[in-house]
Amino acid sequence: MTSFSPGFQGRGRRPADRLPPGQYPTEQFPVLSAGPTPKVPTATWEFTVTTERGATHRWSWEQMMALPQEDTVHDIHCVTRWTKFDTHWRGVPLDVFLAEVDTSADFAVVAGHGGYTTNLPLQDLRDGRAWLVHSYDGYPLSPEHGGPARLLVPHLYFWKSAKWVRGLRLTHEDEPGFWEGAGYHDYGDPWREQRTWGD
Amino acid sequence: MADTAAHLDGNSLAGPLSEILAVEPTAAWWRCPECARSGPLAELHVYGPEPGLTARCPGCAYIALRLVREDGYAWLTMGSAAGAFRFPTA
């Protein structure tokens, strides 16, 4: 299955129109780390969604790989000012997981192995705008880029696309994550240059 | 502790912190609230510098501090909880 996401449709546009303010294009894929790279075996990997009432939904690696998969192409924007056009990913839309979850929460805290967290409105994980991805450019996602699986939320700055993702915690209140609690913006829209708290 | 990402030692915090702190940063000692290990700033494992510097306990990777730089400002968060101080920088 191929998705026709905003990023995919954007391929026909001129690169200048696809570059958010304050960004520069790169052909590289820089690796930014805030800690040691965790080794996460798929044999014990699981993805959980915990609702605001404490109900936890779990998917093993095999269960996740058996869900509907999408190939999807996006421009990604790092708050450190690089933008990479036309990145190719494969994974499961977050809509597929959330369809099984009964919640009235407004926000999600995304957790990764190694203690990383990031926060965003739950709505930004819906409507074909977010994926749990396990392949990049046709190959299994490497550990330095967040493998075996990371979040992909390409319409927000890339720190929201948590590496080594292990779960979502759904909340009524917006709770700042690892970088959001240290000065970075709670939402992080690259087109509005929401880099830090003051933006 | 798995560690395949490169990190620097705590001396790499000396320049960035000296813009904010009037004292010599490398004279500081630190005690980990998680594993009780203690030692000088130089022993911390430092990741970054982008999107920010993250200093961690060399024993258990608990967060010692985060330092985010942008034009005109530095954001300093001590410890693992949220709550940054924003300092003007030259």
Image: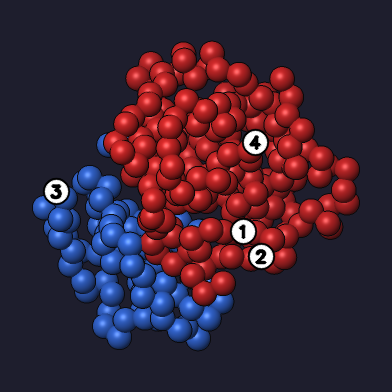
Chain colours: A red, B blue
Callout 2: chain: A
Q: What's the residue at 76%, 57% (across, down)?
A: A19
Q: Nearer the viewer, mark 4 or mark 2?
A: 4
> Quick one: label 4, few (<14), some, or many (20+) residues within 10 Å?
some
Say whether mark 2 and mark 4 are on the same chain.
yes
Residue A12 horizontal side relative to residue A184, left or right:
right
> Quick one: label 3, few (<14), some, or many (20+) residues within 10 Å?
few
Q: What's the residue at 34%, 42% (across, down)?
A: A52
Location of the C terminus of chain A by quadrant is bottom right
Q: Amino acid at mark 4?
A: Gly
Q: What's the residue at 36%, 75% (across, down)?
A: B85
Mark 1 → mark 4, Cα distance in angstroms = 17 Å
Residue at the disc numbered 4:
A128
Res A149 visible: no
First-in-chain label (4 vs 2): 4
Number of the label disc, if any, that sits on residue B19: none
Q: Amino acid at mark 1?
A: Asp
Q: Is residue B45 above or below residue A169?
A: below
Mark 1 → mark 2, Cα distance in angstroms = 5 Å
- Label 1 close to label 2 by CB (< 8 Å): yes
Question: In the rendering, at what x and y percent does residue B29 appear?
Answer: 17, 67
Residue at the disc numbered 3:
B35
Q: Amino acid at mark 3?
A: Cys
Say whether mark 2 and mark 1 are on the same chain.
yes
Question: In the rendering, at what x and y percent does residue A45 appear?
Answer: 39, 23
Q: What's the residue at 37%, 81% (across, down)?
A: B20
Q: Nearer the viewer, mark 3 or mark 2?
A: 2
Residue at the disc numbered 2:
A192
Outermost residue, left side? B36
Callout 4: chain: A
First-in-chain label (1 vs 4): 4
